[in-house]
Structures are given as structure tokens and as C-alpha cells.
Image (cartoon, rainbow, N blue to C red):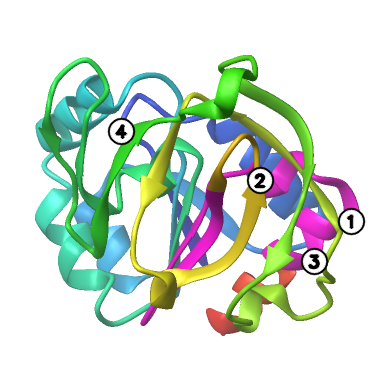
């Protein structure tokens, strides 16, 4: 079973619907005991980094997520992916979960419109389990104004939007998608299938 973490700042239903479509057993929870017994975790997120981290701390789930992510697969999606890093700079400096080295800053964009919204192609830098069946040039759906800055060793795929933007990151059991796999057609659904397979 995959636990979708509910801390009051995530787009739970689209993720839940995508997993249901794929016949992947999941539940939505804010119960630490469930996170301890589940086979994998998904951390969604919408909104601003500081408020999402405040909500996550208020839920009491931060130490559980940090501990369980060392033992079982965790997938952060969009803002949930950004929260995996050490700190973010949206409005104010905010400590993240510290599961992947790096920080999250405003997209420079090179004059392009911010937020970065729409379909962009992927380039695979370091293949991982989630990128099986993914090819260079496959398109996925983004909605974000901030992006991760992390060493290349943690970047599985990137896209280019005025600058190189980490699109899929990976370190140990921990994965993060800046795009929305649940809204990215067959490419995104394949990644969710691959993540579920990791959780078996």
C-alpha cells in the first residue's frame, strides 16, 4: 500500500485518482502509524514552501517522514519535491526536510514568463527506476515558479526553461518530480507504475 501524505497543503485527489486508474492500492493519511507500516509514500504539495512546511511540522509528520524515507520509497511531487531539499527561498528562507542536498530558488527564466506552466520535454541525465520506459524528448506537465539547485548526481532528468531545471531527482529511496506525473499522460503514468513497483 502507498500512503499519500495529507498535511493540508497537497493536491491529493488528482494523485489518488491516477493511482486508482492504475489499480495501485493507496490511502490518504496523516497518521504516523500508517506511514510506518505502508510500503511507500507520496508527498504532494501546492502553494508556497514556507506555509507547506509549517503545515507539515504542525501535523507532526516531519520526523516520521525523515525516518521512513531511509527505509522505503518516497516520491515528492511539485512543491512536495521541493520540500525534500535542505531549504527554500520562497518569500523567506525556510528549512526543508533535508533529504536531498540542495536548495530551492526562483526560476531565472531568461525573460520567459514565470510561473513555468505547461508541457516541456525531458532530457535524461542519470537513469533511475522511474525513468524506465521514458525517452529523451518525452513531454510532461509543469506548474511552478521555483526550482531546485542540487548537484548533478541527484538529477535523473532535467528540462530547459530559460535555464536547466531539475525535473526528476533521485537519492537512495527518495524521488522527486517537479512536474505532475498524474497530469502528464502516459509518460507520467508509467513513472507512477514504476514507483509502485519499487514499493512492492
Q: Which residue is mark 3?
A: 190
| Residue 110 in picture, x, y percent from top left | 57, 26
Which quarter of the figure has residue 22? bottom right
Q: Are marks 1 and 2 in contact (CB under 8 Å)?
A: no
- Examine the structure image and report whether residue 36 is included in the region drawn in magenta: no
Q: CA distance from mark 4 to mark 2?
A: 31 Å
Numbered badge on residue 160: 2
Query: What secondary structure is marked by label 3?
Result: helix
- Marks 1 and 4, the one that precedes in the sequence: 4
Disc number lying in front (4 or 2): 2
Residue under the image location 46 percent in, 41 percent down: 44
Q: Is residue 176 magenta?
A: yes
First in residue order: circle 1 vs circle 2: 2
Q: Which residue is mark 4?
A: 7
Residues under numbered marks 1 and 3 in contact, where contact means CB atoms less than 8 Å apart: yes
Q: For the magenta stretch, what is the residue range?
A: 165-192
Say which label, 4 or 2, has the lower sequence index: 4
Residue drawn at x 37%, y 25% is 9
Amino acid at each position: 500500500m502507498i500512503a499519500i501524505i495529507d498535511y493540508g497543503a497537497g493536491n491529493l485527489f488528482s494523485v489518488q485518482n491516477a493511482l486508482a486508474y492504475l489499480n495501485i492500492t493507496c490511502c490518504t493519511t496523516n497518521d504516523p502509524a500508517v506511514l510506518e507500516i505502508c510500503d511507500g509514500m507520496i508527498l504532494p504539495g501546492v502553494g508556497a514552501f514556507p506555509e507547506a512546511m509549517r503545515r507539515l511540522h504542525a501535523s507532526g509528520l516531519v520526523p516520521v517522514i525523515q525516518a521512513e524515507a531511509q527505509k522505503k520509497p518516497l516520491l515528492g511531487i511539485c512543491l512536495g519535491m521541493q520540500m525534500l531539499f535542505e531549504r527554500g527561498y520562497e518569500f523567506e528562507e525556510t528549512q526543508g526536510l533535508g533529504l536531498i542536498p540542495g536548495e530551492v530558488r526562483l526560476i531565472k527564466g531568461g525573460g520567459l514568463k514565470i510561473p513555468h506552466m505547461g508541457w516541456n520535454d525531458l532530457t535524461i541525465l542519470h537513469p533511475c527506476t522511474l525513468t524506465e520506459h521514458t525517452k529523451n524528448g518525452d513531454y510532461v506537465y509543469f506548474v511552478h515558479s521555483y526550482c531546485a539547485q542540487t548537484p548533478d548526481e541527484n538529477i535523473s532528468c532535467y528540462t530547459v526553461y530559460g535555464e536547466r531545471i531539475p525535473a526528476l531527482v533521485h537519492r537512495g529511496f527518495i524521488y522527486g518530480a517537479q512536474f505532475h506525473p498524474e497530469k502528464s499522460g502516459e509518460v507520467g503514468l508509467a513513472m507512477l507504475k514504476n514507483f509502485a513497483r519499487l514499493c512492492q
